[in-house]
Amino acid sequence: MTLSTQLALDGANNLLFDAVRAKPGERILIVGEKGANTHYETNVCDTIFAAAKAAKQCAMS
């Protein structure tokens, strides 16, 4: 895993668990945008999804 990937996942975890205060078992809606002139980078939703999925798997084990 590259440093930039790890930093992105750390940021996603911060958003999910510190800002949103999501708990294992809760459902969340991740909304993004596609196209040429987006406000956010297009891979942000994928990164947040990956962090949430990893947290869910940890909670289930």
Image (tube, rainbow, N blue to C red):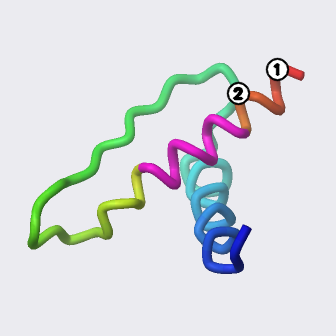
User: Outermost residue toward the front?
Assistant: 1
Query: What is the quadrant of the C terminus in the image?
Result: top right
Viewed as shown, does residue 24 lie left or right of 20?
A: right
The image shows residue 57 at horizontal and vertical percentages of: 76, 28
Q: Which mark is residue 4?
A: none
* Outermost residue toward the right in this view: 61
Give SS at disc 2: loop
> How many marks are shown on the rendered structure?
2
Q: Position of residue 13 (x, y in %)?
A: 66, 55
- In contact (CB < 8 Å): disc 2 and disc 1: yes
Q: Which residue is disc 1 drawn over?
A: 60
Residue at 51%, 55% (x, y): give it: 47
Image: 40 above or below 17: below
Tag 1: amino acid: Met
- Mark closer to the chain start, 2 or 1: 2
Binning the other alpha carbons within 10 Å of mark 1 as few (below 14), some (14 to 19) or many (20 upward) gives few
Residue 37: within the magenta?
no
Q: Position of residue 33 (x, y in %)?
A: 20, 54
Residue drawn where x is 39% and y is 60% of the image = 43
* Cα–Cα gap, marks 2 and 1: 9 Å
The structure residue drawn at horizontal position 59% and vertical position 23%, both measured from the top left corner, is 26
Report the front residue among 29 and 3. 3
Amino acid on which the number 2 mark rests in the picture: Pro
Q: What stretch of residues is rendered in magenta?
A: 46-54
Indicate the quadrant containing the N terminus: top left, top right, bottom left or bottom right: bottom right
Label 2 Cα neighbours within 10 Å, binned few <14 / some 14-19 / many ≥20: some
Q: Which residue is mark 2?
A: 24
Predominant SS of the magenta segment: helix
Q: Residue at x 63, y 35 (%)?
A: 53
Residue 3 in which image quadrant: bottom right
